[in-house]
Amino acid sequence: MAAHVLRLRFDLLIGSLRGDSRHVARAAAVLIALVAGLAAVVWGLVRLDDALDEVALTVTIVGGAAVTIGFFVTPLIGGPDDPLDPRRFAVFAPSPARLAGSVLLASVISVPVLALVVAGIALAMLWSAHGVEAPVTVVSVVLGILTCVLFAKVSAALAARLLRHRRSRELTGLFLVALLVVVVPVVVFLASLQWRGRVPTQLAEAVDILALTPFGAAWAIPWRSLEGGAGGPVLVAVVTVLALAGIWWLVVRWLLTTTERPLSSRAQRGLGWFAVTPGTPAGAVAARSLIYWLRDPRYIVNFIIVPVSAILTMVPLVVVGVPLPIAALLPAPIMALFFGWLAHNDLAYDSTALWMHIASAMRGAADRLGRLVPVTLIAVPLLAIAIPVTVGLHGRWALLPAMVGICASLFLCGLGLSSLSSVLAPYPASRPGDGPFQQPQRTGGALSQAGVLGGALALSAPVLWWGWIALTGDDEAAWTAFWGGLAIGAAVLAIGILLGGWFFERRGGRLMEFAESA
Amino acid sequence: MPIETPEDPVDAGGDIRGPDAVDQPLAPAPRPPRPAPRKKRSPARKPAASAQAVSEPEVVEPEVVEPEVVEPEPEVVEPVVVEPVVVEPVVGEPEPEPEVVVPEVVEPEPEVVEPEVSAPEVSAPEVIAASDAPTAVLVPDVEIVETAPDPDPVIAPEPASEDVAVDAIAVDAGSSVLSGVGADADAPAVRLRGVAKSFGETRAVDAIDLSIPAGTFYGIVGPNGAGKTTTLSMIAGLLRPDRGTIEVAGVDLAGDPARAKRMMGILPDRLRTFDRLTGRQLLHYYGVLRGLAPAVVESRAADLARAFDLSAALGRTVADYSAGMTKKVMLAGAMIHSPRVLVLDEPFEAVDPVSSAIILDILKAYVAHGGTVVLSSHGMDLVERVCEGVAVVVAGQVLAEGSVDEVRGELTLEQRFIELAGGLSDVEGLEWLHTFSG
């Protein structure tokens, strides 16, 4: 069995280099790039030979964990179908355990894993140079590679089953945005560190935690064996490998004993965002709003202006002599406030097309909730970038929770109040198809504009106060601001959606009169 | 079934008396066997009706008859109710077991107008008793939603549409409460009573009374600016009338808008749609907003696209569609949740003749299976050809209403319409137009 699968794997590997010349050229280019990258990594590892033990080992742990996470995440985001999908062997009636083992073994014969093996050997040499015993390095590298391979197989199998029906450009984009939310703060954090030849304390703390996660444990064993206390990482690494192997075996058994649900031929094709969001009224409104937010210049202008103007608010402050670390704290909360405020006149942008929502007798809360999805999807990544940058420029990472709390409170309160104001006090906006700056003559509008801004600020006042206390030195207040901000924001958002929905259901006629007159 | 709040206590009173008042006299009533027994009136309904008329799920069946004795003070009307029952002619109950019929205690004004709606449509025995004095006067008003003898071949063959509604309406001079409002399955598909709407100084719609029977093709015609669109928008629940009540299949639109709206499919005129979506996405949006499961929407959208010849265009954004195609995709969207009533504002405007014929076929089949189409149109010959009932609306008022034959009389519908609309005045002051300048 194993021999057959292995030979199949080899043939697949070589087969990927056959085909028409364009295909071969592309495959060769990818291969060369990979080899070049690998060479760079190995060279970098070799150069770490003469660095301090602490520095070298910290870097290897962080890098190893990043690679492991990469193996886990890549199959989720996208990529070709797994040619060694266990279900394809179902017709041969293999035993799940043997098949799981064979496929796992064959998976080692793949370009990324081979690259990982090469890097692992370089890593072992590096560790040896720093005085780690040979058996420990071997165990560590083997465990690390096994973890990577198992993560990749499990996540590929799960992604193929769970996401296949929804796989689309939109979903991939969504995953990339989610990745951005995680990666950018980490990168900002790393970039803000001051190395000066030794490991910064913040990073040392982060590595301590990382060494006990499934992603970093295997790579942390050598370092811990030098300092003593390798038990923790060894335990986590072994348990991780065993647990993943168990999951893999279960997945294989599940795949062998179930049949694939036939994908209906026309399923979801051409529905775009509608195929990604749930098939409920709220989901449909979310998908429709997303399409408009991403295609309609009236919306696009909004979310370009907000970050730019938020950053520009710093300029006058710096000019008049406010120290940069203080002025740098402003843009993120201002962005949060204005992102929450963006939806305050959302109904008016629909113009008379609003009749579809009113005639369908949909729940008002579903309308309110769906409309907030696009602004949330856009604002959260931008805030995830802005908040760490802000705090990084300020320099005191202890303020991070307070900053998150303040931004969450301002943003969510803004969303909640917007849900109310767009039903209660809509005012004419530029019509669909018009330019974003082509504003209609308007009467009113000031009320809802000022009301949402002022209301969000007022409701966030306690959080702002806690944030101020944290800024003046009390680190405990930072966490108070964090939890307080999340709680206030969530409460205002929930109330705004429910109450706004209640009004929406009752004011349908008046909203239509407004839409037709606007 | 939430009815308007003021009527709730009243309904409860009716329920208490409902069983004795209704059942007792009904049992001996003559009950000619119908050729087409209708499963919908299952015996299960009766207990439900007597126990709690309010909770009955009439959404499912339009023909469900419900006892609706609505009155403010039970003791005052008590004698009244007993009396009408005796007179009640019960027509067309297929099942042997006593059926609960709707005794309605109503004030005179709107109901008395009813008989003049359409002579051919009300072909069953009809007794109108004029009320005198404090004694109760009974108006056993037999409304035939769709009559078997109806000349129109479209509806005749459909057994389900041979639905005889028996409305016993007692006019109580002493009672000042208008009753009979509620989910009456045999109620007209759409009923407007004294509906008025003003925009600022302009009276767009001025106290319109209309009763559109279920299972018919009904046309609303009128000159430009007569208030047709406003009327249809109010029926659709998009505008709220200043005064008056609107019922859709017996459900009060103001009292239970969600239920009433679920029974309607809407095609507005001159309102935008979300035209940055593709045709497929738009149909999906229509369906999912109506609460359908995505898989159902998917198959229905494909069916509708085929029927309306839109399949090739589903991948394009609706903004790129021609006016006629936009109309077609919106009409398809209005039908996707299989509504009971279609409210169509100018459905054939800008639609090419071939598509018009297809749409007409679809609508006729829909009506033949018990659906109701309410449309407004400028095309008199079209209304004359397809509609059974027609209302001529001029300056916000109904000037003529009834079957097409009734309304047009000796003339063609177009001539009659022009006459009603004020006739053709001689155009003066355009003499310069007749001396050509170049």
Image (cartoon, rainbow, N blue to C red):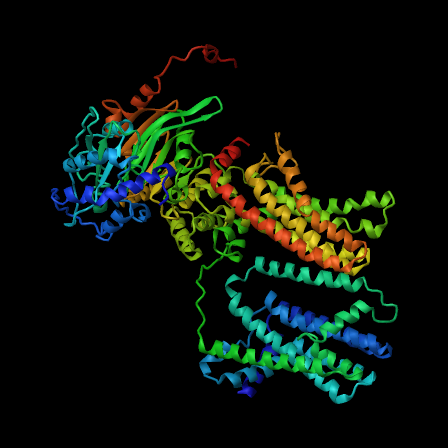
Relative to B4, is A311 above or below? below
Q: Nearer the viewer, residue A495 or A166?
A: A495
Q: Nearer the viewer, residue B436 or A40?
A: A40
Picture residue at 49% right of the left edge, 13% below the top: B436
Tell me the quarter of the picture where residue A65 sits: bottom right
Tell me the quarter of the picture where residue A159 sits: bottom right
Q: Is residue B142 visible?
A: no
Relative to B298, is B177 above or below? above
Measured as percent of width and height from the top left, residue B318 is found at 50, 44
Q: Nearer the viewer, residue A517 or B94?
A: B94
Relative to B162, is A163 above or below? below
Relative to A438, is A168 above or below? below
Measured as percent of width and height from the top left, residue A179 is found at 66, 62
- What is the number of callouts on the image? 0
In the displayed structure image, the side of residue A74 where residue A355 appears, left or right: left
Q: Which quarter of the figure is the C terminus of chain A placed in?
A: top right
Measured as percent of width and height from the top left, residue A130 is found at 83, 83
Q: Is residue B177 visible?
A: yes
In the displayed structure image, the side of residue B182 where residue A485 appears, left or right: right
Tell me the quarter of the picture where residue B163 sits: top left
Picture residue at 52% right of the left edge, 46% below the top: B317
Measured as percent of width and height from the top left, residue A445 is found at 62, 34
The outermost residue toward the front is B75
